Amino acid sequence: MAKKRLRIILDTNVLYAGLYSSEGASFKILEAIEEGKLQTVLSITLLFEYEDILKRNQTTLGLSNHEIEKILDYLCLRSDHQKVYFLWRPYLSDPNDDHLLELAVASGARLIVTYNTKDFKGLERFNVKTITPKELLEELS
């Protein structure tokens, strides 16, 4: 029987870090997604956030518009798509992260992979937790 892939919400800061450097844990998370070890969950809101951050930082990342579109297309192809029908805003200390909590609850994904774990206090109420890329890699090994 095939092992079920762990479903995660990938915060934009992890995607950015993984595209910025091939040296760290974020890049290894992106590799695990490509290898099918992790299953990302994506909403329209999160996709637009990815696009905004990547395009605003495309010079730093060394990516063309075409390359960014290919990355976003790939993420759309590889991710589970989830509509969010309910909002709990504001709930988190950073209101820009509320959509990640809503996506996790709506999709049943129990992990938000982020470097900003301090911004996600109180998730236990929703049976969701945050984890850094390094911590996730340790759990996977």
Image (tube, rainbow, N blue to C red):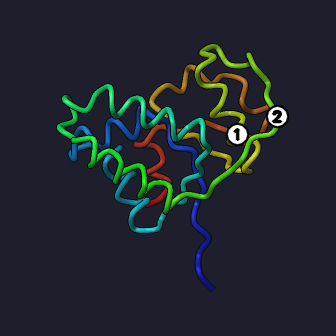
> Quick one: label 1, few (<14), some, or many (20+) residues within 10 Å?
some
Indicate which disc, 2 or 1, sits on the residue closer to the N terminus: 2
Residue at 34%, 58% in the rendered image: 31
Residue 2 sits in which quadrant? bottom right
Amino acid beneath label 1: Val
Residue 65, how many percent across, how many down?
Answer: 27, 41
Q: How many marks?
A: 2
Q: Write down the residue under mark 2.
A: 86
User: Which quadrant is the N terminus positioned in?
Assistant: bottom right
> Quick one: label 2, few (<14), some, or many (20+) residues within 10 Å?
few
Amino acid beneath label 2: Phe
Residue 98, how many percent across, how many down?
Answer: 66, 25
Q: Is residue 58 above or below residue 79?
A: above
Residue at 75%, 20% in the rendered image: 89
Label 2 – label 1 distance at C-alpha: 16 Å
Residue at 63%, 34% in the rendered image: 100
Residue 114, how many percent across, how many down?
Answer: 49, 34
For this rendering, which residue is in front, 45 or 138?
45
Residue at 52%, 41% in the rendered image: 47
User: Which quadrant is the C terminus positioned in?
Assistant: bottom left
Q: Write down the residue under mark 1.
A: 128
Q: Residue furthest bottom?
A: 1
Task: State which mark lies toward you, 2 or 1.
Answer: 2
